[in-house]
Image (spheres, rainbow, N blue to C red):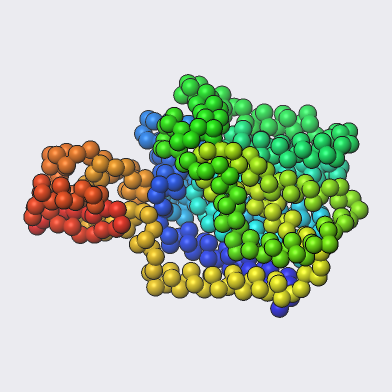
Amino acid sequence: MTKSRAILWGLFLLLAVRVAAMIWVPLTDPTEARYAEIARKMVETGNWITPQFDYGVPFWAKPPLHTWLSAMGIAAFGVTPFAVRLGILLSALATLAILWFWARTLTDRITAGVAVLVAASSALFFVALGFVQTDMALTLGVTACMAGFYGGLQGDRRWGWLFFLGLAIGLLAKGPVATVLSMMPITAFMIWRGNWKDLLQLPWLGGTVLVAVLVIPWYLAAEIATPGYLYYFIVGEHIQRFLQPGWSGDLYGAGRAHPKGMIWLFWILATLPWSPLLPILLWRLRGGIPRERPGDGGLYLYLLMFALAPLALFTPAANIIVTYVLPGVPAAALLSVMLWARSGPMQTKWVHLGVSEVLIVSAALTLAAFLGLGRSAVPSEAQLIEAFQGSGRLAILDARSFSAEFYTQGRIKRLKTIEDVGTWLAPGDGVLVPKHYQDQFLARFGDTVTAVAENRKYLLYVPAT
């Protein structure tokens, strides 16, 4: 098998397994199901300006690009997990396409292909390929921005336009943090490089107009529709969230406080199975960094700054999650593969080894899916909703479940107390009861209810017949 064919097979298997998982694996609580339900509400209500955390409750935490992507899938294919994940998959494929075309301008086809394979098969990127969240759209914007800027410096105005398009995508995907993740390494690189007149190679006037036309109308419309959005989003989500441990101002959940510097451990986990090869790469580079080819213009440094930007930005942050690493993964993959190739022969056995790892993982996941293993362990109420065969209504006690809302298309009733269940429950109805409420629930209803299904968190009760 040639290197090119091995790379194509690896990418095909990754995509096949991931698409199968998009169909087979239920939407997971809380993050993925929350964003999916926000997208479903957007389609149901027809409000494409303001994403809604609940009916009539605006979701100010993020701009709407990822919601638009998921909502368009629902509008086209219906309310299914695959439909809501499709737009995220397309944004991931667009990211890999940009990485491929950019790498082809910098190196040969094999190196570019291996870089795409390494990025796509990295643990976090593989999961995020079809996971409903904001960071893949952000990664698309940052990758387009960084690739476009570097290509634009070389005098290709098509890449220069991509730089500005990437800025617009990032601002609509996650806001000002996208600009920071891009401009921080770009500014540091230009200070090191000098030759500021090369910036004139980029279409600044037209590009600025492009960003303004694509971005400003939505931000203005969002503030007009729900006054207070801009203050909460810019000050709360971009300053207080990261500087205040356990930030209490979050309107949509609790802050995730971690020790400062945890982002570096997240990076190691996110880039598995490739991160353990880092010591081998460093050993191959023990004689020094290979000399760049003519015209590379500080490429290694640029890619290093690109890859490390999320780590540098979030090292002092108090509230972080592992997906904050994602925007730097494409650059890390390209830099690692280029250094590996230029520090010594890129033997076929290493490419085959990487594809073999993908084959093993793919076979294991396919077997697990065929045997029905692990689906019940997914944090989701999808199976309980499927198990409800009653002709009446469905309710959930005490807590809110976004997956239950999605799979019932918003029709599930939220009840605050066990007494509320008593006044609501009727023949044909069902209620999801948290397991820590089970004793109290049975003490109140006794033999008048029957448990027909359960998962790790809830039991589904229906009136006894």
Residue closest to the eye, 297 or 366? 297
- Residue 125 image offset from top left, x and y in percent: 58, 55
Residue 11 seen anywhere in this rendered image of the structure: yes
Establish if 295 lies above or below 10.
Answer: above
Q: Residue at x 91, y 53 (%)?
A: 294
- Residue 55 image offset from top left, x and y in percent: 36, 34
Q: Residue at x 59, y 38 (%)?
A: 316
- Residue 20 image offset from top left, x and y in percent: 49, 64
Establish if 96 lies above or below 219.
Answer: below
Residue closest to the eye, 71 or 435? 435
Furthest toward the right, the residue is 294
Q: Quadrant of residue 56?
A: top left
- Residue 175 image offset from top left, x and y in percent: 59, 34
Establish if 217 lies above or below 463.
Answer: above
Residue closest to the eye, 245 or 208? 245
Residue 64 seen anywhere in this rendered image of the structure: no
Q: Residue at x 60, y 42 (%)?
A: 315
Furthest toward the bottom, the residue is 1
From the viewer's perspective, is 98 left or right of 424? right
Establish if 65 lies above or below 115.
Answer: above
From the viewer's perspective, is 19 left or right of 423? right
Q: Residue at x 47, y 55 (%)?
A: 82
Give the number of callouts: 0
Q: Quadrant of residue 137?
A: top right
Q: Quadrant of the N terminus?
A: bottom right
From the viewer's perspective, is 292 left or right of 100? right
Q: Quadrant of residue 166?
A: top right
Q: Quadrant of the C terminus?
A: bottom left
Residue closest to the eye, 322 or 276? 276
